[in-house]
Image (cartoon, rainbow, N blue to C red):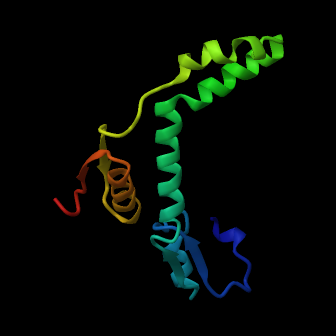
Amino acid sequence: LQESEVPHTVRAIARCGAGTNNVPVARMTELGIPVFNTPGANANAVKELVLAGMLLGSRRVVDGINHMTSLGEQGLAKERVEKDKALFGGREIKGKTLAVIGLGHIGASTARDAEHLGMKVVGYDPGLS
């Protein structure tokens, strides 16, 4: 956010998320415009995307979709689907170890849910260690 992008009618700036690194806080303070953030407000959404990425990657879902799309374009999908599905079984995440670096709202929530999925979790946060 640049100062030139801030209309003179602005009375406050609120940023969804933990940081304000993309807002010129010092200049806004000089102009009398308070800057707020909302730490943790999007933590659940981010955690869900992290978990979805782990599941998609471990089970090779995207690879399977791309493979079947390619076979469909070649007209081979029906005859190859049963044979080829074994190529994309992937691995279960249960019993695997997840390292979480940063144990704020997102990291702690991700760690809790990973444990509920049967993962071993180790964590590090320089602010806590």
Whether residue 40 sits left or right of residue 63 in the image: it is left
Between 2 and 43, the residue placed more toward the observer is 43
Does 59 appear above or below 16?
above
Q: Give the quarter of the image for residue 94.
A: top left
Q: Position of residue 104 (x, y in %)?
A: 34, 64
Q: Give the quarter of the image for residue 81.
A: top right
Q: Residue furthest left?
A: 129
Q: Position of residue 63 (x, y in %)?
A: 60, 24
Between 26 and 125, the residue placed more toward the observer is 125
Q: Quadrant of the N terminus?
A: bottom right
Q: Quadrant of the C terminus?
A: bottom left
The residue at 51%/24% (across/down) is 89
Whether residue 90 sits left or right of residue 79 in the image: it is left
Does 88 appear above or below 55?
above
The residue at 74%/78% (across/down) is 7
Whether residue 13 sits left or right of residue 128 in the image: it is right
Q: Give the quarter of the image for residue 10.
A: bottom right
Whether residue 2 sits left or right of residue 106 in the image: it is right
User: What count of labels does the image hold?
Assistant: 0
Does 26 appear above or below 12?
above
Query: Is residue 21 among what the camera can see?
Result: no
Query: Is residue 1 among what the camera can see?
Result: yes
Does 128 appear above or below 114?
below
Q: Position of residue 66 (x, y in %)?
A: 68, 24
